[in-house]
Image (tube, rainbow, N blue to C red):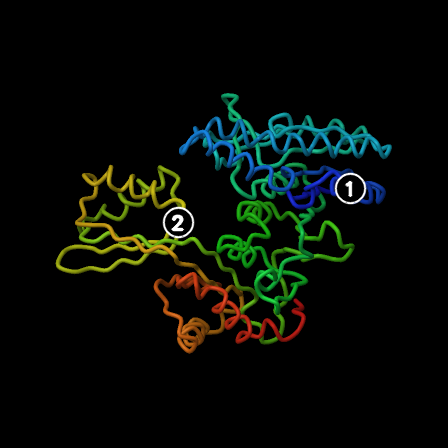
Amino acid sequence: MGIIVQKFGGTSVGSVEKIKNVAERVIEEKQRGHDVVVVVSAMGKTTDQLVVMANEISDYPNKREMDMLLATGEQVTISLLTMALLEKGYDAVSYTGWQAGMTTESVHGNARILKIDTERIERPLKEGKIVVVAGFQGITEDGEITTLGRGGSDTTAVALAAALKADKCDIYTDVTGVFTTDPRYIKGARKLQSISYDEMLELAQLGASVLHPRAVEYAKNYSVPLEVRSSTEREPGTIIEEEVSLEENLIVRGLAFEDQITRVTINGLSNSLTGLSDVFTTLAKHHINVDIIIQSFSDERTNLSFSIKSNDLKEAMEVLEKNKSLFPYEKIETESGLAKVSIVGSGMVSNPGVAAEMFAILSEEGIQIKMVSTSEIKVSTVIADSQMVHAVESLHETFGLSHSTVRA
């Protein structure tokens, strides 16, 4: 049999009892004859609690020291899970991200994996041991501890599966799979039996929290078979693969949404050829992610609007003001209290008019659209966050996602 990589998130390992349950799930896979590598997150709300303590000390905690702090959470989980496996009579060994050979770029708080040396993991696997690895963390070539950002344990698991040429990577969560939208908010949400890498990547990037976008990127680029499953229920999850057969007439396969969006408008920006490049290059250098972009011209000047996460607003404003000499502008306006609602489906490529239908639905519900972005398989709109759930409910029902169990 081959190698199986299992990943368990924070809610799945939130207590000693839950860690014992995870150990049982790991043992089940081992008993099927597989070599097993387990990637785990910090227990429950540990990371959030560590962030709170750091913020009690400093309004702007040093990013290097934050990585030193946050990386401790996963170390607790790997040791406890390994103890649980040993107690049940299964030989196991735990490794931190750096012990597992995870080399990252030198970006604290949101590093990308550069390479993985799997020798340290492969040795105990050949000896029949279960290997437990801390997700979310790595080390730079200079020996600095880094973290991979929110959801980074997903990325760790899929990257390890790719490096080890694993047969499969199972992502265990507190839900039973990937749903048409977030079932915590929308009662009619249905589980998908399968979804394509591209659709899942769009949903992940647009706010669906079930998987980290980088994890889906790795899975697609290295053709890693991926399944999202429940850590407590013994039932099939959702398979993420290259191609899935479209359900008849199901053009839209999922909806994603996220709040805490802010629109930033730069008025009176010079119409120079490098103006846009200068603005977004400067923001990118400070790791500020820009989403939807709208540009308009008037009297040899440009008005530029873009959306960002609201928690990036303060830093974005400081960066823009500090670099005003590089791209002169008249003034900056901001609007917070916004949300992004998106529809996703590969069937949209061959079915024109989906965007128009989405706009019509929102208009009928009295929901004003403030910004729009489209691609071949998605349409995103920015609206008031007070109308977010209502918009998703209306779109979910209208596009036929609530009527019956969705089958791919």
Q: Within 10 Å of the Cα at label 1, are there few (<14), some (14-19), or many (20+) other Cα atoms? A: many
Q: What residue is pinned by disc 1?
A: 26
Q: Nearer the viewer, residue 406 or 66?
A: 66
Residue 156: x and y in percent read: 60, 38
Exactly how many numbered labels are in the figure? 2
Residue 351: x and y in percent read 49, 73
Which circle's residue, 2 or 1, is located before the other in the chain?
1
Q: CA distance from mark 2 to mark 1?
A: 39 Å
Q: Position of residue 366 (x, y in %)?
A: 40, 74
Q: Residue furthest top?
A: 142
The kind of residue tagged 2 is: Ser
Q: Quadrant of the N terminus?
A: top right
Q: Name the side, left or right, on which 302 lies relative to 283.
A: left
| Residue at image point 41% right, 49% down | 309
Q: Is residue 349 above or below residue 200?
A: below
Q: Residue lying at the far bottom in this picture: please name it.
A: 364
Q: Amino acid at mark 1?
A: Val
Image quadrant containing the C terminus: bottom right
**Residue at 60% across, 27% down:** 98
Mark 1: which secondary structure?
helix
The answer to which quarter of the image holds residue 75 is top right
- Is 275 placed above or below 245 here? above
Q: Horizontal and vertical percent for residue 72?
A: 60, 29
The residue where tag 2 is placed is 310
Mark 2, Cα crowd under 10 Å, few <14 / some 14-19 / many 20+, is some
